[in-house]
Amino acid sequence: MNSAWIEAAKILSVNPTSQVKCPECSNSYLEVSDQYIPGQQIFERFIKCPKCNGSSILRMTYKPTV
Ligand SMILES: [Zn+2]
């Protein structure tokens, strides 16, 4: 993962509804989908560009809601 992806991932890990331009092609906004793992405290957040198919996966931990 290059630094542009890391920056995009950082934003989307905090706010998955943010509109973040694809770090590779800059032609589209990244799409986010979460894949939950039953019985675990973690889930995977897939980040994908619909234009160039660039993608990245974040491993997320549930944050306790207040
Ligand atoms: Zn792209």
Image (spheres, grey):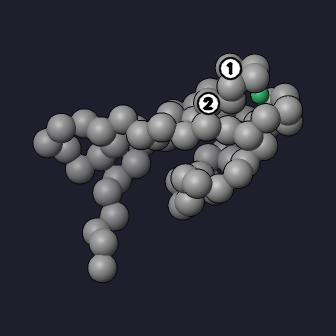
In the displayed image of the protein, which residue is found farthest to the top? 53
Write the residue at 48% across / 37% down: 33
Question: Do callouts 1 and 2 mark residues in contact (Cβ within 8 Å)?
Answer: yes
Instruction: Judge: label 1 CB < 8 Å from ligand 1.
Output: yes
- Residue tagged 2: 48
In the shown orientation, is residue 49 left or right of residue 65? right
Q: Amino acid at mark 1?
A: Asn
Which SS class for mark 2? Answer: strand
- Residue tagged 1: 53
Q: Is residue 45 above or below residue 65?
A: above
Write the residue at 34% across / 64% down: 63
Quadrant of image for the C terminus: bottom left
In the shown orientation, is residue 13 left or right of residue 39? right
Write the residue at 56% across / 60% down: 15
Give me the disc on residue 45.
none
Q: Amino acid at mark 2?
A: Lys
Question: Residue 29: which quarter of the image?
Answer: top right
> In the image, residue 6 lies at what x, y percent?
66, 45
In the displayed image of the protein, which residue is found farthest to the left? 39
Write the residue at 68% across / 25% down: 50
Q: In which of the image's four quarters is ligand 1 placed?
A: top right
Q: Is residue 4 visible?
A: no
Q: CA distance from mark 1 to mark 2?
A: 6 Å
In the displayed image of the protein, which residue is found farthest to the bottom? 66
> In the image, residue 2 lies at what x, y percent?
73, 35
Instruction: Judge: label 2 CB < 8 Å from ligand 1.
Output: no
> In the image, residue 1 lies at what x, y percent?
66, 33
In the shown orientation, is residue 20 left or right of residue 33? right
